[in-house]
Image (spheres, helix red, strand yellow):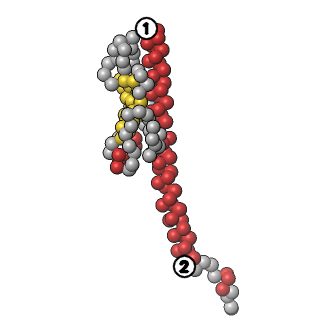
Amino acid sequence: MYRNRANRGFSLIELMIVVAIIGILAAIAVPAYNEYVIEAKMVEAHSNLADVRVRAEQYFSDRRTYTGFTCSIPAASAKYFTYSCQGTPDDTTYTVRAVGAGTMAGATFTVNQSNTRTSTFTGTFATSGWTNSTACWKRKKGDTC
């Protein structure tokens, strides 16, 4: 019986072209997606540090001192970062730090009583193009303040 060439399916070259196209798209999409996920995880630190700062200012407003203020974050809000006071808050100063854990290790953010925000990147963050800042919290790779 004679078979029609149109009914034979795909040739090897056609399949290789499709595989090459999928490979090219994956090579572009996966790194972009990974950067997007990192940026989304950083939002946790930024929002929790802003929350702690508001609570610190309320504490100061009520007592006219930061002495006794605790820099705690509810465990449910701390998924990618650990939070702590840098030193002990005194009458007029405090500094709160968020240090990355797990996949965010190497990213550190701080805020103090003057609302001075810093971003520090080490390890894989530093080698992949994230730069430190003493003036803001970096939100994306290559951000400027």
- Whether 131 is drawn above or below 62: the answer is below
Residue with the most extreme left position: 87
Image quadrant occupied by the N terminus: bottom right
Mark 2 lies on residue: 13
Residue at left offset 41%, top offset 33%: 135
Give coordinates of residue 46: x percent, y percent. 47, 32
Residue at left offset 51%, top offset 70%: 20
Count of residue discs: 2
- Whether 50 is drawn above or below 122: the answer is above
Task: Give the amino acid at mark 1.
Answer: Arg
Marks 2 and 1, how far apart at CA = 76 Å
Task: Please tell me which residue lies in front, 143 or 76.
Answer: 143
- Whether 44 is drawn above or below 88: the answer is below
Task: Tell me if I can see residue 76 in this picture.
Answer: no
Task: Please tell me which residue lies in front, 69 or 80.
Answer: 69
Mark 1 lies on residue: 63
Give coordinates of residue 68: x percent, y percent. 37, 13
